[in-house]
Image (cartoon, rainbow, N blue to C red):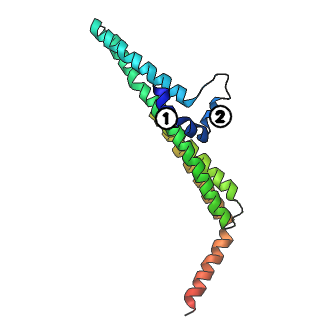
Amino acid sequence: MVPGVLDLAHFDKFASKSGLESFLQHSEFELTISGIISNVIYWLVILMFVITGANTLGLTEVADMLHQLANYLPKIIVAILVLIFGTLLARFINRLVFAWLHSIKFEGALTISTSAEYAIQIFTLFVALEQLDIGTQLLTAFFIIIFGAIFLALAIAFGLGGKEWAAKVIDNLQNRKKKP
């Protein structure tokens, strides 16, 4: 039933546009995103029946452990959806930034648009891993350090390389203020 619903919603089309399908097909296994989601939901339903049976038999510790596992399975689905839609957003932003920069004849349009796509992809990966509760504090600290380091490097490069340009801009502004 779940594969039929995903097929009806054209889920594989979105997954193939995001590029995750082709990434999964490079492995030796025949994996699709809709297949993974279908299997996760299948096992979630089975776990619910096993939990009910364990509670009926009075095996509360086993039921609690399986209940924790059942609570984790939807997080996997959400992480997959975050990856798919984040990848689609990153590709859209790449094309949008490239089109805008190319239209104003900016020389580094491809580099900047690709960098924007990679930045969004990395952020999406962090959000997906945070959804899975994998090293949340470590990932947040890593992201902040890398983000800060990149902008510190850009600030230093602009400060050292753009010193003369900034002086010219300031002189031009001062000359404009002096002229009535």
Q: Amino acid at mark 2?
A: Ser
Query: How many other residues sit within 10 Å of disc 2, few (<14), some (14-19) or many (≥20)?
Result: some
Q: Quadrant of residue 78?
A: top left
Give residue 4's position: percent from left, percent from top: 49, 29
Q: Local crowd at mark 1 within 10 Å, few (<14), some, or many (≥20)?
A: few
Tell me residue 124's x, y (percent): 53, 42
According to the picture, the residue beneath numbered tag 1 turns out to be 8
For the residue pair 10 and 148, the one nearer the viewer reads as 10
Which element type, helix, strand or loop, lies under badge 1? Answer: helix
Rendered residue at 29%/6% (across/down): 57
Most extreme residue toward the right is 107
The Cα–Cα distance between marks 1 and 2, rounded to whole angstroms, is: 21 Å
Residue drawn 62% across and 81% down?
Answer: 171
Q: Which residue is mark 2?
A: 22
Residue 138 visible in the displayed image: no
Query: Closer to us: mark 1 or mark 2?
Result: 1
Q: Nearer the viewer, residue 164 or 87?
A: 87
